Amino acid sequence: MDKAGSKRRTGRGRSGSPRTGPVRSHFVFTIPSVFAASRDVQEKILSDIERRGFNEQTRFAIKLALEEALINAIKHGNRFDPRKEVHVEATITPEEALIIVEDEGPGFDRSSVPDPTLRENVEKCSGRGILLIEAYMNQVQWTNGGRCLRMIKRNEPDVIPGC
């Protein structure tokens, strides 16, 4: 366990070579419902993604989606309730990152979330997190009554050349 009370587990590579490291990393975190606690989670996951050679655009997409997911879990899911926690699990290989974020809140119906691209919502200062997550990740799934978000980003070539 680290300072934040988070667990980190890593798998072993087939060759076991210290040069290439494990084939996959597996992280498990349980954090309180405060934004400061989410920064350590983001830092550890993003550091591993960079270490595995994810390109700049893919790293940006994961950073954005992870940050939005954690904000939503803390703010909208757990409503900053100090008795509730956010659970994060990430499995990272050189090919993809699978990240699961689950809160202990009441959940929500994804289909009832207002579309932030509609004229009446465009000027609102919030409400774009889900849209960004779904736009930037390759796969997004909401389960457990909206309390659990499972997202996958593949490490694909940059979409915009030269970035």
Image (cartoon, rainbow, N blue to C red):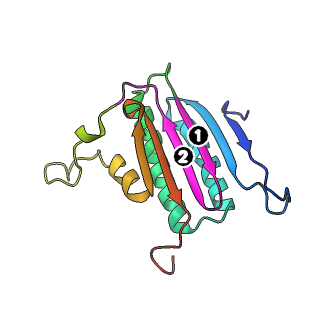
Q: Which range is magenta?
A: 86-107
The part of the image, by quadrant, that contains residue 144 is top left
Quadrant of the image containing the N terminus: top right
Q: Is residue 142 magenta?
A: no
- Residue 3, above or below 128: above
Q: Amino acid at mark 2?
A: Ile
Task: Name the disc covering residue 66, or none.
Answer: none
- Look at the magenta stretch and give its main secondary structure: strand
Of 30 and 157, which appears nearest the observer? 157
Q: Position of residue 112 (x, y in %)?
A: 23, 38
Q: Position of residue 79 (x, y in %)?
A: 39, 27
Q: Is residue 112 left or right of residue 32?
A: left
Which sits earlier in the primary sequence, circle 1 or circle 2? 1
Residue that appears at 20% across and 53% down: 122
Q: Residues within 10 Å of mark 1 (few under 14, many from 20)?
A: some
Residue that appears at 62% across and 47% down: 91
- Residue 8, above or below 135: above
